[in-house]
């Protein structure tokens, strides 16, 4: 039997605190679509995606109908395309991106992730082909998302890939300059990338995943913020406990939706990714949670500690609530997608340096940050190298999603609208890292003992 | 109160409808009429007044319903506007999963 209080708590989360299921993402293996004839391969890809995901959107809507819970996005992740396109005779994979875009449009999903490759130890020919195709692929498609893994704790950092990605990000921004560089919002450079992440733009269907799988991403920064507000003057133990309990409740909703979707679509249920993913909507902000903990502005001293507590408590609550937790699970800190982060960046409280420190304890990395248009490829590569080093040494996922704002300088804005939001251009260091990133080769994998 | 919901029961077709807003004549009648016109059976009603607000919770069975939950929510939203209250409807599993292990 439920008490009045329990019922009202759930209702309040949905009605006022933006509790939603952020995404149901269907992972699809495309490994069996490889073909020496690229036209045949693309046909197989299109057919397989539309066959398996044909009912995805309708099923998502049916679950909304049945349970009354909002499900914001239905998406698809696929095998990294470099693996599928490798056996084809092409040296340019833009047509594969077009096929993914067409298939996504045909089944009605807003994003499809997997124009991706993993190059943490080196490149194959296909890896290079794919990376070189990224700028055009992201400018001529609307739904395709791309990611490249350049480092792991076990392999070290592929600095050739890091430098190449610095150049690719610049080119992508230039190719989509008339839309404020939106191509870069769909491109993530990873270290230690997970293969079961349902959140875009970094989602792809990893090696070791089944033929087809349903992964669910839940969110709810607003719910956590209101819970934190209720323990305003309490100590940290109480604060952590409150976040944990709230994360538990949010994750249970993801578990319910994930299991139901998997059953309805007759595919295995993969994982629930319990991530606090902000949106530009008021009250849906991770920065607001940190400020509710007692910080005047997100980015001030204490922010890293507050984020560490938040991220860990979310993981603990989430791990208890779902039989399979995976993906990125934690707190996201994308600047342009979070009204509180934007406010803090405008005020100068939140800088690139502080964001970098925060990525040591959050679930991902430097996310949706606009930098001046004249930032060089070498500087971007150096920022990626810093992030990859943090991920490699700390055995965690890190990522970089930077937007060089072509023709803009510090204080200007990039505007994407919708879930991607808007971001103030923030400064990077004026000093060059060029000689460093141009060295080439790999940074060796770190020692796993003698830790201090 | 609301004892008819047993979280151990297999998932059924029951929903929980909540109404929150300033008290006035005709709220229960209005909500009940929307449910009845869609052939939804009310199993239990419980209400209280918090300060000056009416908080009403209904448990209802949708097994004979002529509409799905999303359509019902639309009709309840419209009714809520007429009555000056907020009406929400969620499947019982949402509560089961959140509050019971």
Image (tube, rainbow, N blue to C red):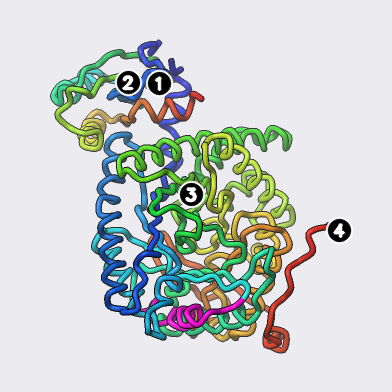
> Mark 2–mark 4 contact, CB under 8 Å?
no
Label disc, if present, on residue B52 of the rendered structure: 1
* SS of the residue under disc 1: loop
Please give the residue where the numbered disc 3 appears in the rendered image: A284
Question: Decide: marks 1, 4 in contact (CB < 8 A)?
Answer: no
Disc 1 and disc 3 in contact, CB within 8 angstroms: no
Question: What is the chain letter for disc 1?
Answer: B
Secondary element type, mark 2: loop
Inspect this view and state whether residue A421 appears.
yes
Residues in magenta, as a range: A122-140
Name the chain letter of the residue that bears numbered label 2.
B
Residue A385 to residue A202: above or below: below
**Mostly what secondary structure, the magenta segment?**
helix
- Residue A383 percent coordinates (x, y): 65, 75
Residue pointed to by mark 2: B23
The quarter holding residue B59 reads: top left
């Amino acid at each position: 039997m439920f008490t009045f209080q329990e019922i009202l708590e759930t209702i309040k989360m949905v009605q006022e605190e933006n509790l939603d299921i952020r995404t149901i993402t269907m992972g699809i293996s495309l490994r069996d679509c490889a073909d020496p004839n690229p036209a045949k391969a693309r046909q197989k890809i299109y057919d397989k995606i539309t066959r398996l995901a044909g009912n995805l959107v309708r099923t998502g809507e049916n679950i909304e109908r049945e349970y009354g819970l909002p499900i914001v996005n239905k998406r698809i992740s696929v095998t990294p395309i470099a693996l599928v396109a490798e056996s084809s005779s092409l040296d340019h994979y833009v047509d594969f991106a077009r096929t993914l875009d067409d298939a996504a449009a045909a089944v009605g999903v807003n994003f499809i992730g997997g124009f991706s490759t993993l190059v943490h130890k080196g490149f194959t020919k296909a890896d290079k082909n794919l990376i070189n195709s990224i700028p055009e692929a992201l400018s001529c498609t609307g739904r395709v998302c791309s990611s490249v893994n350049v480092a792991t704790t076990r392999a070290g950092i592929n600095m050739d890939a890091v430098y190449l990605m610095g150049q690719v990000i610049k080119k992508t921004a230039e190719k989509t300059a008339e839309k404020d560089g939106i191509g870069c919002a769909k491109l993530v450079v990873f270290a230690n990338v997970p293969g079961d992440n349902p959140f875009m733009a970094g989602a792809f269907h990893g090696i070791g995943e089944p033929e087809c799988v349903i992964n669910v991403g839940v969110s709810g920064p607003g719910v956590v913020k209101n819970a934190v507000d209720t323990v305003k003057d309490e100590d940290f133990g109480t604060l952590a406990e409150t976040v944990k309990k709230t994360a538990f409740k949010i994750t249970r909703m993801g578990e319910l939706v994930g299991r139901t979707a998997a059953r309805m679509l007759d595919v295995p249920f993969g994982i629930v990714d319990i991530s606090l993913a902000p949106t530009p909507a008021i009250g849906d902000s991770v920065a607001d949670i940190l400020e509710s903990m007692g910080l005047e502005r997100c980015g001030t001293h204490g922010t890293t500690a507050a984020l560490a507590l938040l991220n860990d408590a979310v993981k603990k609550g989430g791990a208890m609530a779902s039989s399979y937790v995976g993906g990125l699970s934690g707190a996201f800190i994308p600047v342009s997608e979070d009204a509180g982060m934007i406010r803090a960046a405008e005020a100068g409280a939140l800088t690139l340096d502080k964001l970098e420190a925060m990525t040591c304890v959050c679930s991902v990395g430097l996310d949706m940050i606009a930098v001046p248009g004249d930032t060089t490829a070498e500087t971007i590569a150096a920022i990626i190298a810093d992030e990859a080093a943090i991920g490699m040494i700390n055995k965690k996922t890190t990522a970089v999603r930077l937007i060089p704002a072509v023709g803009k300088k510090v204080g200007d804005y990039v505007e994407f609208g919708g879930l991607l939001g808007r971001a103030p251009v923030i400064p990077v260091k004026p000093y060059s890292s060029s000689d460093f990133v141009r060295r080439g080769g790999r940074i060796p994998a770190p020692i796993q003992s003698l830790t201090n | 109160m609301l004892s008819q919901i047993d979280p151990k029961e297999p998932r059924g077709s029951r929903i929980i409808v909540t109404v929150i807003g300033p008290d006035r004549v005709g709220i229960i009648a209005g909500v009940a009429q929307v449910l009845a016109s869609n052939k939804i059976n009310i199993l239990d009603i419980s209400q209280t007044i918090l300060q000056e607000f009416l908080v009403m919770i209904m448990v209802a069975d949708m097994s004979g319903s002529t509409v799905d939950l999303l359509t019902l929510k639309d009709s309840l939203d419209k009714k809520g506007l007429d009555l000056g209250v907020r009406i929400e409807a969620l499947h019982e599993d949402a509560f089961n999963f959140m509050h019971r292990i």
